[in-house]
Amino acid sequence: MSYEHLAVERHGPVGWLINDRPDLRNAMNSAMRDEFADAWTELNEDPAVRVIVHTGNGRDFQTGVDVTEIAGDGVGFERYRESMEDFDVHFTSWHQDVWKPVITAVNGICCGGGFHWVADADIVIAASDAQFFDPHVSVGQVVAIEAIGLMKKMPVEAVMRMAFIGKYERMGPERAYELGMISEIVDPPEQLRERAQEIGETIAKNSPAAMAATKKALWGALEAGLTDACKEGAKHLVSMWGHPDQTEGPAAFAEKRDPDWETI
Amino acid sequence: MGDYETLELILEGPVAWLIFDRAGDGNAIDARMFVELEDAWGRLEIDEDVRVIVNTGNGRSFQTGLDVRQLASNPEALRASSRQTRDFQLRMTGWHCGVTKPIIAAVNGTCAGGGLHFVADADVVIAADTASFVDPHVSVGQVSAFETIGLLKKAPMGVVARMALMGRHERVDADRARQLGIVSEVVPADRLRARAGELAATIAQQDPGTLRALKQSLWNALEVQ
């Protein structure tokens, strides 16, 4: 497929989804929002893609919804009312049930709605020039979904502080790393994509089926208490029993060769 | 208490030490340890002299998970472990076995795969500076579930998911584990047991009933979504 506001690339086993409205700091208009749904699905369904990296063209990763579109055509936020009320949205990998590992690689600014792709990725890394802030309340908007997702995954106070301080304070990559919001800082920033590709290729050495089941178990755990999450996790764990990768993994290890995994 | 083959159990006043003792095999859980762990946790729970339990390992590793090859040679043990896994009725950790006393995990070296159960399920975790954490499941075609689910209830998910998805290709070292709050203290390896003993003795001064109620209420909090 071709896209106007996104770039989709493939490098070896790694699929790339790149925000491509650099002049608008990759802000998301309604057309881009629709394209996200297709792009995640395209990469998810491509058997050659084992891992997906999400980043942005230009200086910044993502700066939320395109407010010029919202302000400019009289429709405003009403265009999103129905989908938000039903929480029937499709612009992140989590929304789209992508069970391949997703790495978000934050370049430059990630603010407001940009946090959707931090909250909904499995692994988040950032360039050393990355900056995080959430301006919603400073422009009279509520932040909900992105912050709720983050709170499930990291210390809550830091999320609340960003939500309430709005545009008047930015979090740098060091603090994001300390808090576990990101797992790696790439310095110099120009090496962000190279490093993301490297992590992607490393992850692609692991069993795709086992990773998909693991991802389901972990994300399921955000929906349930500990014991219930483990009981649900047991189903995903047992789903791999008898799968060829379970014999291939130990065999390859014993024979000191790369495993030949089943494609999913 | 020397009647275990795979565990060493030491009682020092109010502090009990439950020590993995298959140092030659990375302290991996074989069929025997699988049975002995349940017995040992049960015994420490009912022993009224025991107020705090320290869990550590002999040798260079803390705990490296199920010894799958050994387990496979014992069909009965394999069936039992498969059944317990399928039904989530494991009996390996203090949490699995319903232990109500405070448990301190003292991670003395490599903690891999199923070894992470004992970190996720402990109340307090400290580590030697030589400790490292790795989850190789997906690199050998296995799913990572219980251990990482437990960890992500207690530490930032992104780093737990990264550990689960990187498999054997990346390790989290002791300092990063402390920064993330997976462990609360890192000490030189030769100081680990002394420090764990100090912490245990400090906790053991508290009223056992209070500790039990506290432990129960905090773990119950993880049961709410």
Image (cartoon, coloured by chain):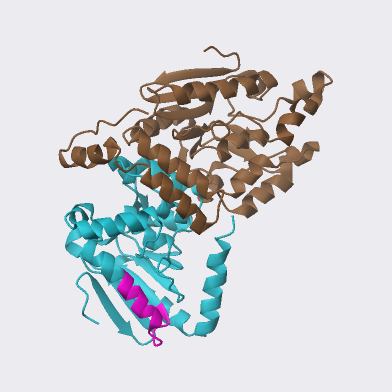
Chain colours: A brown, B cyan
Q: Visible in this render: residue A255?
A: yes
Circle count? 0
Q: Looking at the picture, how far across and down is residue A10, in whole percent? A: 42, 19
Q: Looking at the picture, how far across and down is residue A252, in whole percent? A: 20, 37
Q: To which quarter of the image does residue B166 belong?
A: top left
Say which residue appears at 54% left-offset and 12% top-offset: A2
Q: Main secondary structure of the magenta part?
A: helix
Q: Is A31 situated left or right of B137 in this image?
A: right
Q: Is residue B40 magenta?
A: yes
Q: Is B90 situated left or right of A221 in this image?
A: left
| Segment colored magenta | B38-52
Q: Looking at the picture, how far across and down is residue B214, in whole percent? A: 55, 74
Q: To which quarter of the image does residue A94 belong?
A: top right
Q: Is B1 situated left or right of A70 in this image?
A: left
Q: Is residue A66 magenta?
A: no
Say which residue appears at 56% left-offset and 66% top-offset: B220
Quadrant position of the C terminus of chain B in the picture = bottom right
Does residue B179 lie above or below B49 as drawn?
above
Does residue A152 lie above or below A58 as drawn?
below
Q: Visible in this render: residue A57?
A: no
Say which residue appears at 56% left-offset and 38% top-offset: A118
Does residue A69 lie above or below A225 as drawn?
above
Query: In this view of the protein, which residue sits in the foreground, A113 or A120?
Result: A120
Query: In this view of the protein, which residue sits in the foreground, A184 or A221?
Result: A221
Does residue A243 lie above or below A58 as drawn?
below
Quadrant position of the N terminus of chain B in the picture = bottom left
Residue farthest to the right, as pictured: A74
Q: Looking at the picture, how far across and down is residue A251, in whole percent? A: 19, 39
Say which residue appears at 60% left-offset and 37% top-offset: A131
Query: In this view of the protein, which residue sits in the foreground, A46 or B200?
Result: A46
